[in-house]
Amino acid sequence: MADTQRMACQQLQSRIMTAAEAAELIPAGATVGMSGFTGAGYPKAIPAALASRIGRLNQQGGDKFRINIWTGASTAPELDGELAKVDGINMRLPFQTDPICRDKINKGEMEYTDLHLSEVSQYAWSGFLGKMDIAVIEATAILEDGRLVPSSSVGNNKTWIEQADKIIIEVNHKQPAKLEGMHDVYYGTALPPHRKPIMITDPSERIGEQYLHCPLDKVIAVVETNAGDRNSPFKAPDNVSKRIADHIINFLHEEIEIGRLPRTMLPIQSGVGNIPNAVLEGLNAGPFKNLTAFTEVIQDGMLKMLKSGTLAVASATSFSLSPDGMEDFEANIDFYRDKIILRQQDISNHPELIRRLGVIAMNGLLEADIYGNVNSTHLMGTRMMNGIGGSGDFARNGYLSIFVSPSTAKGGAISSIVPMVSHVDHTEHDVKVIVTEHGLADLRGLSPRQRAEKIINHCADPEYRPMLLDYLQRAEASGRGMHTPHLLNEALSWHQRYEETGSMKQ
């Protein structure tokens, strides 16, 4: 018998079934919208059951059983990994971090569309992506009238429920029941020419509802689960991360003293990872109080800031917590529920809101070139790492767009600062600040050649700095195109040298 507190809708009681039975309802070739964002709130049982079914069928020969998968962002090995392992994914969008998916994408065995996260819902509403057949949504509970209590992420769930012909719901008993009330689902979105202003002027404001509307006639299955999210541990900040964090904290203090930032700062956005968490720890150790966050994910560092009072409120679309962070969150959920708002990602990443609020955006890069163009997705220009995620939403529209990275990778064999990036995700027009452990380059208001000198002298590793200065000087001496000087026969030679010798060093 189902738990009536989690499964209060009598009309759906007859549709409760096992994950294996629900997986049988997903046909080959289907386009499936899955819940999930950064390893939170994704379906736990149905993807594994579907992968098992696909694996059996594909072993029998004949046409391969594959589906198209759309999500909010990355998910977990139980979803992406299991389905990729049996070659069950034809097309994946809009973001992934799974090593098996990555390998198949880079071998040309899986199609992958990398999208700005704020645009995914608009693409779906506009019909650019085609028809969605089935949505598989994790929920914390189903109310009597069929509304869903969202799980630990909202992501694109509202859009998937609206767009899909059929819906399968996973009710996850492991998710804290007290998540109810933390969400803010906005039902005022529309396509042009019917759009209206989104009335958020502070990250603490709520404009929507606590629940997801779910048409009962679309629901073909309900599966009950009891499994936790993918909560990956974060490493303690190393020396490089701490030095990067110190440069950013000092820069923000200077901006306040100059008067370019208010003493309460502006809302912060932080990408996921060890360096962003180090920055958050640095902010938490400073004199700041009652800061706000308008971001994509709540990380461990933000929980600490909320507890200390450094952060007053955090608006996001998902969590990305370590096991210790999740334990703390669940133990203190009554405290956090008053300070955290989870929204759908077309609101959490909305350009209008990012621009209006004046968000300070901090995201990672793979490489930057001497003129400030940033590659955040492709290794050596061709091999997809993860995807652009929401960094572009915040970089172009934020009050400050800060990109961070260690100055080298692969034990110093790769320089993160190169003559020309091998792939461009964020152009020089959107990149305001670049930071490595060696220093910070404030690029605002500078010409390309001024930016080059600053990036080389402040951010490049000392071992690569002479090589970069030599390249710049010879490019300037060529007399060709003095606005952004390049030697076209050498601009990507560092990448070629790495491919051929295993090092960018001469």
Image (cartoon, rainbow, N blue to C red):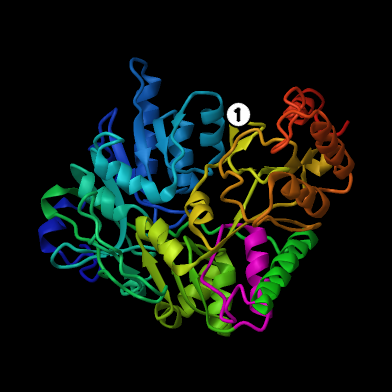
First to last magenta residue range: 259-288
For this view, does 403 lie left or right of residue 26?
right
Find out whether residue 262 is within the magenta segment. Answer: yes
Q: Residue at x 32, y 42 (%)?
A: 123
The C terminus sits in image quarter: top right
Q: Residue at x 81, y 57 (%)?
A: 438
Q: Nearer the viewer, residue 349 or 307?
A: 349
Q: Nearer the viewer, residue 278 or 51?
A: 278
For this view, does 171 lie left or right of residue 496?
left
Find out whether residue 309 is within the magenta segment. Answer: no
Residue linked to disc 1: 382
User: What is the three-letter code of the residue carrying label 1?
Assistant: Thr
Q: Residues within 10 Å of mark 1 (few under 14, many from 20)?
A: few
Q: Position of residue 183 (x, y in %)?
A: 33, 69
The answer to whether one can see residue 214 in this image is yes
Q: Position of residue 294 (x, y in %)?
A: 47, 67
Q: Residue at x 59, y 55 (%)?
A: 363
Place residue 271 in its image quadrant: bottom right
The N terminus sits in image quarter: bottom left
Q: Secondary structure at mark 1?
A: loop
In the picture as drawn, the residue positioned furthest to the top comes out as 62
For this view, does 505 lie left or right of residue 336?
right
The answer to whether one can see residue 21 in this image is no
Q: Image height check: is 10 above or below 118?
A: below
Q: Image height check: is 57 above or below 100?
A: above
Q: Position of residue 428 (x, y in %)?
A: 61, 46
Q: Nearer the viewer, residue 483 or 15?
A: 483
Number of on-image labels: 1
Q: Position of residue 223 (x, y in %)?
A: 27, 52
Q: Nearer the viewer, residue 91 or 310?
A: 310
